[in-house]
Image: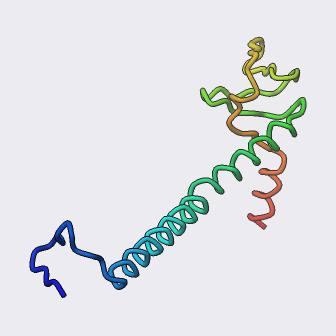
Amino acid sequence: MRLVFAGAPDVGATTSTGTQTSASGALMQMLIMLLIFFAMMYFLVILPQRRREKEFRQMIESLKRGDTVITTGGVVGKIVDIKKDVVKIKSANSTELEIHKAYIAKVIKEKEETKEETESKD
């Protein structure tokens, strides 16, 4: 039996089965930690992003004439016309803007908001 006092074994030294077992155990532990890390990333980053994209698609598909919208640039206007990818909004008495549907940030539902405010006051 050869005793090794340094950190690294000699070139000609043979490895024992205990060293191989601990190496495979360390590998399994590392793989488990990587799986846990990817699972956490999926639930904390990827899944919420998919939900936001789904909600945005539903909002864009449910647009109709007369809805009041806010664009990503902060312009508030009422929808006048809807085409395939373009929405025409009226932001003032005579100002009409054509914007891409992807740049609509929010749909304001004034009628529902006023109903909720009156119900909460009662």
54 to the left or right of 21? right
Q: Residue at x 74, y 13 (%)?
A: 95
Q: Relative to residue 85, is residue 15 depicted above or below?
A: below
Picture quadrant of residue 93 = top right
> Which quarter of the rendered picture does the N terminus lie within?
bottom left
22 to the left or right of 92? left
Decide which of 105, 119 is in the foreground and name it. 105
Decide which of 27, 51 is in the foreground and name it. 27
- Residue 43, position as x, y percentages in the image: 61, 62
Q: Residue at x 37, y 83 (%)?
A: 17
> Which quarter of the rendered picture does the C terminus lie within?
bottom right
Q: How many marks?
A: 0
Q: Is the image coloured rainbow, by chain, by secondary structure, or in one colour? A: rainbow
85 to the left or right of 11? right
89 to the left or right of 15? right
Decide which of 66, 122 is in the foreground and name it. 66
Q: Relative to residue 47, is residue 28 depicted above or below?
A: below
In the rendered image, the residue lying farthest to the bottom is 1
In the rendered image, the residue lying farthest to the top is 94
Q: Relative to residue 87, is residue 62 depicted above or below?
A: below
- Residue 100, position as x, y percentages in the image: 74, 22
- Residue 55, position as x, y percentages in the image: 76, 48
Q: Residue at x 69, y 49 (%)?
A: 52
- Residue 34, position as x, y percentages in the image: 49, 65
Decide which of 11, 24 is in the foreground and name it. 11
Q: Residue at x 76, y 39 (%)?
A: 107
Picture quadrant of residue 20 = bottom left
